[in-house]
Each structure stands twice: as structure tokens, then as C-alpha cells.
Amino acid sequence: MLQKNVVDSTGLLLIKQNTLLKNIQKSVKIQNKLVLSQRETIKQTLGDGYPTVVIVPENDNNISFAVTPSGNYSIYDANIRVVNSNKLRKMKIRRENNKNFLSVDSIRTCIVEFNKQPLSPKMFSRIDYKVLTSESPKFLVFEISARNISTIQYSIIYKDKNKLNHAYKIFKVQNRKYDLLIETTDVFINKKIWEDNFYFKENECYLEYK
């Protein structure tokens, strides 16, 4: 009789433990669903991914640009600043404490801005900015500040045997630090070309306006 009671008690304990385990697993599944739902809501509300600027050939002499999100979500309130680095290099730059300074008046001649553009996934939003392909290579900077992310894209556009090429690097910018997100380049564009034509050093921005 004692052995039977022990067996029955053990069986009841195992049933209770299994029930508790199932309840915990059910609770974890509910929590995971809530977390996924919250993440989805955040992505839908704030946007997700990063913007990429691509070239759009207009004709043999001109190209314009379009911007598209990298993922499956929209990017909201995208403020786009285009900096013509070809012009920028001709400006008088003051060097101080290992940083480069330009006057605000000087930088304005090199900048075009486009404000609060919504960027839809798998769509290309045109930027009303054109350059001549005959003046190759082109060095352009696209600074984009959106609801979910701030990025900077360095683009080199050049012709090789009448073929138009676009090499670029995209960085996430946060607290004046640059984190590389993606780069497309080739063996003909070495590190020195990037550093000579764009104002970044390692992962820090060192171009400022005063």
C-alpha cells in the first residue's frame, strides 16, 4: 500500500510539473509573439533599413539620382543633402586640431537639400539633382537623416570605356561615429582616392562648418 501511495504521489507530481512546464512554454510563446508584434509596430511606425542612392542615366551627357530603402519597410521623413565634393575640394579649407573647417557661406555653394521625403520599399524616389557625365569622375556625398536612421553615402561616378560606373560606401552616423553598412567598389579605386576626395578618417567625421 505504501509503495502504491508513493507511486501515485510521484505520478501526480510529474503531472503537475508537466502542466507547469506547458504553462511556462505557453507564456513564453505569448511573450515572443508580443515582442515580435512590438518590433513590427516599431518598424511600421519609425521605418527600418537604410537608404541607398542609385544613379539614373538621363541621356549620354546627364545622370540624375533616386533613393530606395534597403529592406521591406518604408523610411520616413528623409531629409537629403547632396554635397558636390568636386566643388568642395576647390574651397578654402582651414585646418585646426586635425580637423577641416569650411565657412557656412562656402559650403552653401556645394549643397542642395531636399526635405521630408517618404521612401517606399522596393520603389525608387527620384531626387531632382543632375550632373554631367562628361565631367568624370564625380565625387558626391549624400547625407540622409530619417526617422529611424542617419546615413552618409560617398559616391564615385566615373566612365570606363563608355560604361558608367558607380562605386559607393554607406555609413550609419551616430554620435559623430561612422559605422560602415555596405560598400561597392573595385580594384581601380583605392583607399587614397576615397580619403583624398571625401572628408572622413577611419570611422570619424572630420569636416565641420563654421
Image: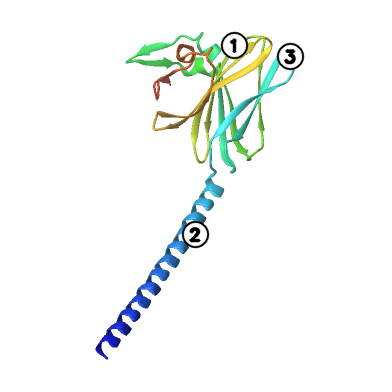
Query: What's the mark number on residue 66?
Result: none
Q: Secondary structure at mark 2?
A: helix
Where residue 5 appears, x then y in whole percent? Answer: 28, 87
Where is mark 1, residue-wise?
137
Q: Amino acid at mark 1?
A: Pro
Q: Which mark's residue is nearer the viewer, 2 or 3?
A: 2
Q: Are marks 2 and 1 in contact (CB under 8 Å)?
A: no
For the residues labelled 2 and 3, the Cα–Cα distance comes to 53 Å
Q: Residues within 10 Å of mark 1 (few under 14, many from 20)?
A: some
Where residue 109 appears, x then y in whole percent? Answer: 56, 16
Where is mark 3, residue-wise?
60
Of the 4 image quadrants, the one containing the N terminus is bottom left
Of the 4 image quadrants, the one containing the C terminus is top left
Give me the residue at 67% from left, 37% from top: 123
Query: What's the mark number on residue 33?
Result: 2
Q: Secondary structure at mark 3?
A: loop
Q: Quadrant of residue 28?
A: bottom left
Where residue 97 appears, x then y in whole percent? Answer: 32, 15
Q: Earlier in the sequence, mark 2 or mark 1?
A: 2
Answer above or below: position of 70 versus 207: below
Where residue 151 appears, x then y in whole percent? Answer: 50, 31
Q: Amino acid at mark 3?
A: Asp
